[in-house]
Image (cartoon, helix red, strand yellow):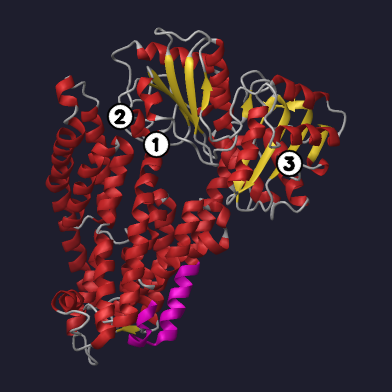
Amino acid sequence: MSDTITAELVSIDAELGADKAAVIRALADRVAAHGRADSGEALFADAWKREEQDETGLPGGIAIPHAKSPSVTTPSLAFARLEPGVDFGAPDGPADLVFLIAAPDTAAEAHLAMLSKLARSLMQDEFTAALRAAGDADEVVRIVDAAISDEPVAESPVAVQSAEPVTAPATAAGPSTPRIVAVTACATGIAHTFMAADALTAAGREDGVDLVVEPQGSSGYKALPQSVIDQADAVIFAVDVDVREQERFAGKPVVRSGVKRGIEEPRQLIAEAIAAAADPSAPRVTGTAGSAASGASSEAAPQSLGRRIQRILLTGVSYMIPFVAGGGLLIALGFLFGGYEVNADNRAFTVVLENALWDLPAGGLGQYIGSVLFVIGATSMGFLVSALSGYIAFAIADRPGIAPGFVAGAVAVLMNAGFIGGIVGGLLAGTVAWAIGRIDAPRWLRGLMPVVIIPLLASLAASGLMLLFLGRPIAWLMLVLNEWLTGLAGTSGIVLVGVILGLMMCFDLGGPVNKVAYAFATAGLASASTDNPTPYLIMAAVMCAGMVPPLAMALASTVLDRRLFTPVERENGVAAWLLGASFISEGAIPFAAADPLRVIPASMLGGAVTGALSMALSVQSLAPHGGIFVFFAINPIWGFLLALVAGTLVSAFAIVGLKRFARSRTAREGSAVAVTA
């Protein structure tokens, strides 16, 4: 670890700029200049994004801007001792000691633990005094190396392993000694997580409180023993992200705040926790993630409604992804083995139910294997909306929300409401389940609440609202759109039909509008013939446009500009290549659910281009599904590929442009220094 910081990465008594954006940029450029990052601009953008989430200035003249970035090739620490200091948002004024912590987005646990150890050292007056007294860059390197070495830092009140629980035993523990457990976690899990743990630990020790902290960092975490949690009088959640396995703390009085408050006001947090333990009406832990909205105390760090909803949606998406990826790939393999008619007239299901490996159907082994793969994949995809809805509700109300969420998602499918209906159903189910869970039920009834009462009432309320108020408007919309498209297809405006179908296929990615367009195309195939090729033209435009969103998201997130997307989105992008090639539009849902206002318009733009080109080039498809794997049923294939590539490029560059614009605008508002790509 001795090469994490070198003299070349140290600036002594330097003036790197008038504001924090300039300082972060200068340090990021220095990291890149010494071959530790591919791009100083990309590293700056990631560090600035983290800075916008929560300023990194800390009491005592310290600032620790940091980022996990795909541009970083070597874990690095860049240090500046500023003269004069620069405001990083600390309550006590400008910072003169600034560390830029740069970690690869795939950093190993050992590196993350080492970087966390530096953050903990910054909580010690001896360490910061030594940095201020250092005479040159080499001395700074020696001081930092000693702090992040494998030897424990002297006088440290924390455990050597960064992921270990941190204990502050009371000096004279007795029956009346308050017992508090705490969890700390920040967005990157590198610095603030462990600094807050140390600050709470030190404050607890000084105040004679029996306090144990569980830091949940990027390098992993060791869960507190359940016996310790059970004996606690109250819980402190000093977090900027979801608490992992939050159900372990269910029923405990809770004080919630952002992680920085754990660093800056640890004694106040502990006092609030002690007060909550003595207050029967204090908020209690009832759900995960949550819900920053669920059970948050009035002292919790403010969080916008949009950010809360985004975090809830991302929880649902993360649990839904395996259904999309696994099911979509199995369907694609089914087409590969069994041909594009593998499921014509539900043939795949008939073959699987009526035949066996030792009693093959007329189509032979290929038909049987393809049918098996298709049936498994279609069954998996059938859970997609329910899983999305169920785990959105889980993010709001913990386990009691899962069943109502799944039921609401199933009702959304029944009503042909698609993934948008699933999102609405999940939010409804989770909110109702959370609200019911807040009721102060009698002790004899509490055991039935999470397993009977909440699922029953929340399912009835959420699914009832879906059935009574959502189904009929969607059915009406589907009927109107279907009749309108049928009328257009009979006129000379066939290219306009391609544009409209392309827009519909990309509007809700498997939802009701998408399904109307697809049903319109497949219904016409029965009447298609050499004399009437229009249905084949419509089918080709629909399938080609439906492939655009996942392929565009894959191209944008894995090739064009990876840094604009989260690590989870980049992983989704890898799977989206094959999903898009297989005509599985749902491959773009994880991106749309997290960022609908940019992903959906960009997808629709590319879909319109693809639909128009497909019609203009007279591309025909005899297959109703399969994407590129049914190339033998598409004519001309070159026209299909040309339309597909054009639309994919348009959508991909559109989403990159929209994301870059939003980042640049935010950066300008935050610091007068634009983030340019």
Secondary structure character of the magenta stretch overall:
helix
Residue drawn at x 58%, y 50% is 105
Q: Nearer the viewer, residue 501 or 202?
A: 202
**What amino acid type should be assigned to the residue bearing mark 1?**
Arg
Q: Quadrant of residue 233?
A: top left
Q: CA distance from mark 3 to mark 1?
A: 32 Å
| Labels 2 and 1: the sequence-earlier one | 2
Q: Which residue has dot 2 on it?
A: 286
Q: Which residue has dot 1 on it?
A: 308
Quadrant of the rendering where the N terminus is positioned: top right
Q: Residue furthest bottom?
A: 530
Q: Position of residue 428 (x, y in %)?
A: 24, 40
| One can see residue 492 in this view | no
**What amino acid type should be assigned to the residue bearing mark 2?**
Thr
Q: CA distance from mark 3 to mark 2?
A: 43 Å
Mark 3 secondary-structure assignment: helix
